[in-house]
């Protein structure tokens, strides 16, 4: 990996979106080459003639060494931090995998019993699958139509992150201090990475994430017809937190040393194009599925006539019970492709989405099978022909 030697902020010896500063020597001391801040960085040649050794003012060597050690610790920490962020997504994926396996094991035994665990897994129509819920659990319900709050938050929050990233790439403006501190806490990218396609990949993925949230918001407000179903308050809070963390996860993949963004789109690769094409394909099918579900409760004129559940037909519904969940998985896979297939953290995000959506699909499929005796037996729950 090569590192950028100069940033875009006038007067800064090394501009970085993380706001790092070079070590300073005493004002009275002659100029001396500072230790290279990162591996493979260039150092200016020492001034002075005749090969005479340049002397530093008292304490300058200690200051320079201290700055170098601070940089070394920061660099080592930046390599360790992404592991913490990856561990978060791995933990979430493992938790939903365990819940999915437990649900699959309970199904042959007559189904689950009502309780807090089932209440945290189910939402909307699937809450009826575990019988009468205790009154104290119903006190923690919020309307399912509050799903739109997730996308409102995502459009605003991830739109802000996208704006700040564009300013950093194209206008050489460093991230604000609060965002730098937040990224450092979650796991910023390694300081010695400065590869143009990594900047472009993160920019494209954040754009795709924002567009996905914007489309879902429009669908929730203008197309979908929500029934009187409910979410648990913990599910609601988890959803809000998810859309905050997912945008920060993308931003953490940005190399710390922002390069000049003028030629950024000259570095587009084949996997960027492949990821965007797959994203569009999956998004179109997901939109069609949401329209099909909404039309089940509308007349031909578009007026809502009922809030009951019916068997959907058309598009991917001919193969699976929940094609919109399968499309959601494909959308996140397309973002992993846009990252160049090699971003481990994002593949852990994809793993989380896989188990999360698979669990929701299994519960929805169970609802359809239990409530409609004529439900098509050829349909799988989540993945066509497989699951």
Image: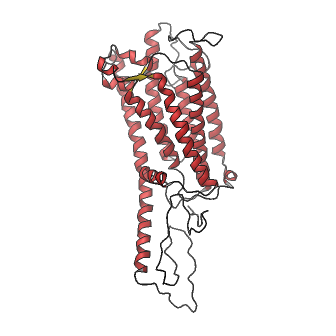
In this rendering, the answer to whether 366 lies above or below 200 is: above
The image's colouring method is secondary structure
**Looking at this rendering, what residue extends furthest in the top direction?**
373
Percent across and percent down for residue 256 are 53, 57
Q: Position of residue 161 (x, y in %)?
A: 54, 46
Q: Is residue 269 above or below residue 222?
A: below
| Residue 262 coordinates in the image, percent (x, y) | 68, 55
Q: Quadrant of the N terminus?
A: bottom right
User: Residue drawn 58% across and 67% down?
Assistant: 5
**Spot occupied by residue 204 in the image (x, y as percentages of width and height):** 61, 44
Residue found 70% across the figure and 52% down from its top: 266
* Number of numbered labels in the structure image: 0
- Depth check: give the residue in front, 111 or 5: 5
Examine the rendering and report whether any part of residue 134 can be seen.
Answer: no
Q: Is residue 109 visible?
A: yes
At horizontal 57% and vertical 84% (from top left) the residue drawn is 47
Q: Is residue 268 left or right of residue 376?
A: right
| Quadrant position of residue 16 | bottom right
Q: Quadrant of residue 65?
A: bottom left
Check the image and report above or below for 137 versus 337: above
Depth check: 247 or 314 in front?
247
- Residue shown at 52%/45% (left/top)? 250
User: 335 above or below 226?
Assistant: below
Foreground residue among 377 and 35: 35
Q: Give the side of residue 43 with respect to residue 120, left or right.
A: right
């Amino acid at each position: 990996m090569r590192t950028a030697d100069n940033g875009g902020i006038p007067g800064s010896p090394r501009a970085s979106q993380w706001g790092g500063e070079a070590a300073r020597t005493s004002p009275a001391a002659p100029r001396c080459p500072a230790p290279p801040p990162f591996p493979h960085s260039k150092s200016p040649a020492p001034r002075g003639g005749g090969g005479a050794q340049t002397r530093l003012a008292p304490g300058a060597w200690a200051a320079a060494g201290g700055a170098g050690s601070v940089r070394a610790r920061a660099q080592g920490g930046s390599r360790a931090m992404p592991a913490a962020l990856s561990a978060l997504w791995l933990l979430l994926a493992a938790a939903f995998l365990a819940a999915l396996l437990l649900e699959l094991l309970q199904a042959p035994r007559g189904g689950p019993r009502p309780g807090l665990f089932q209440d945290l897994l189910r939402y909307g129509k699937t809450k009826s699958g575990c019988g009468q819920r205790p009154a104290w659990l119903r006190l923690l319900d919020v309307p399912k139509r509050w799903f739109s709050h997730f996308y409102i938050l995502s459009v605003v929050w991830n739109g802000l992150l996208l704006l700040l990233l564009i300013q950093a790439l194209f206008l050489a403006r460093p991230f604000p201090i609060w965002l730098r501190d937040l990224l450092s806490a979650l796991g910023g990218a390694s300081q010695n990475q400065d590869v143009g396609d990594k900047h472009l990949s993160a920019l494209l993925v954040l754009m795709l994430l924002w567009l996905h949230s914007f489309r879902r918001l429009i669908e929730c407000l203008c197309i979908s017809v929500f029934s009187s179903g409910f979410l648990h308050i913990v599910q609601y809070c988890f959803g809000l937190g998810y859309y905050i963390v997912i945008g920060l996860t993308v931003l953490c993949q940005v190399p710390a040393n922002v390069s000049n963004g003028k030629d950024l789109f000259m570095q587009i690769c084949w996997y960027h194009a492949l990821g965007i094409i797959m994203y569009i394909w999956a998004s179109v099918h997901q939109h069609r599925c949401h329209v099909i579900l909404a039309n089940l409760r509308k007349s031909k004129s578009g007026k809502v006539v009922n809030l009951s559940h019916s068997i959907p037909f058309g598009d991917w519904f001919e193969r699976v019970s929940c094609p919109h969940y399968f499309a959601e998985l494909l959308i996140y896979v397309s973002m992993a492709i846009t990252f160049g297939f090699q971003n481990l953290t994002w593949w852990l995000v994809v793993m989380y989405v896989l188990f999360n959506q698979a669990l929701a699909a299994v519960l929805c499929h169970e609802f359809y099978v239990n409530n409609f005796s004529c439900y098509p037996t050829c349909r799988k729950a989540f993945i066509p022909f497989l699951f």
